[in-house]
Amino acid sequence: MASSSGLKILLVAEGSGGHLIPALQVAHALADAGARIKVWYANRQPTALLSSALAHAIRGASVEVDPIPLYGASTPLNRLRQCGELWHRAQQCFEAFAPDVVVGFGGWVSAPVVLAACLRRAIRQRRIGCLLHEQNVLMGRANRVLAPWVDRVAISFRETSPGRGAASTVMTGLPTRRQIGCGSRAEAAEQFGLDPNRPTLLVLGGSQGARAINRLMIRLVAQLAPAEQRTWQVIHLTGATDEAIVRTAYAASAVRAWVAPFLVEMEAAYAQADLVMARAGASTIAELAQCGKPAILIPYPHAGGHQRVNAQLVETVGGGLMMEEAAATVERLLGAMRRILADPRLRELMGAQMHALHHGNATERLAQAILDLADTGHAA
């Protein structure tokens, strides 16, 4: 990647891992190339601990990471008020920091900042380059609204369509942490206090946890056969709310389990896992593809249905099974788990198909797209 010394770039992301992880990975790459970076992210209570841990790891002399405090209920009036505050904050940043490029990573918090940059360059001599990164197969609502205004849209999947009137697209893939897929199973087993030779299920609810998945697992472990209770192992990331009740359920069933609200070192969890049960957020799909792990996906049924489309893509290529939340019974889940965990060849085939969705060098591709935008004169 060419040197970007002197460039200043503002990245704006939601506070969930799916938005914040790619933003932080690209921030690190751009800083290594010599750019000065600001990262703004939404500071939401359910994801605050994880967001803070992720941000702390990237913060440095060339990268400033600042939470955007959000408050009150998520009502239209309250959100409109906070959009106005973000617009004002963006204008102050444009004067003091003077970014050459503004990059939005989706979610409503990025909308007023990106739009302010687009409108500012329309009425001022100095132009600010504007780029969106879309993590999901199906474009999110905020990015669909912003797409016709920006200079470029970076997409993570070839199947993504930015919609009519949108800016030109560039295929970058979705930046993930480089260490994903590089962990040692023996070291991971030692970290979690598990046996490296026993079948292991990794349960993920996303950075906010998933109560529906947690409740399913509580009922499911109680129905395991005695031999399964003795041999199966579970790594379960519950989110902040359900940790205690999930931990109690595993203890009552005698299933060997490692339970925590979240985990930063996800490479260890993937290294130990034989099968992953998860939501279908874009970063989860990208990480599963990077390390080639088969999955049972239960997409979050709201938020525009974008997780359903992600999961359908995985099922289409043969990397996993999709179950709608309403149809994900304990009996169906247990049947699928038994079939996959009992068949190493099936897991190998599913893992290879999952890996086919992986786009290598996504961080470098996205960083280069941002630098290319600055070099075209859009930000001159």
Image (cartoon, rainbow, N blue to C red):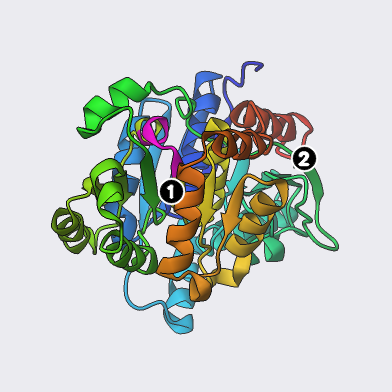
| Extreme-top residue of the structure | 2
Relative depth, front residue between 211 and 39: 211
Mark 1 Cα shell of 10 Å, populated few (<14), some (14-19), many (≥20): many
Q: Is residue 157 above or below residue 322?
A: above
Counting labels gives 2
Q: Amino acid at mark 1?
A: Gly
Q: Taking 27 as reference, is 168 left or right?
A: right
Relative depth, front residue between 58 and 217: 217
Q: Nearer the viewer, mark 1 or mark 2?
A: 1
Q: Is residue 158 above or below residue 120?
A: above
Residue annotated with mark 1 = 17
Residue 43 location, quadrant = bottom left
Relative depth, front residue between 232 and 302: 232
Query: Where's residue 18, x and y in %?
Result: 49, 49
Relative depth, front residue between 149 and 201: 201
Q: Element at badge 2?
A: strand
Q: Taking 90 as reference, is 261 left or right?
A: left
Tell me the residue at 63%/53% (across/down): 136
Residue annotated with mark 2 = 170
Q: Taking 259 as reference, is 43 left or right?
A: right
Query: Split into 4 quadrants, where in the image is the N terminus?
Result: top right
Q: Visible in this render: residue 146?
A: yes
Residue 335 is a magenta residue? no
Query: Where's residue 87, x and y in %?
Result: 51, 62
- Give the magenta part as a residue range: 269-275
Q: Is residue 267 above or below residue 108?
A: above
Tell me the residue at 47%/31% (across/down): 177
Mark 2 Cα shell of 10 Å, populated few (<14), some (14-19), many (≥20): some
Q: Is residue 220 above or below residue 286?
A: below
Q: Earlier in the sequence, mark 1 or mark 2?
A: 1
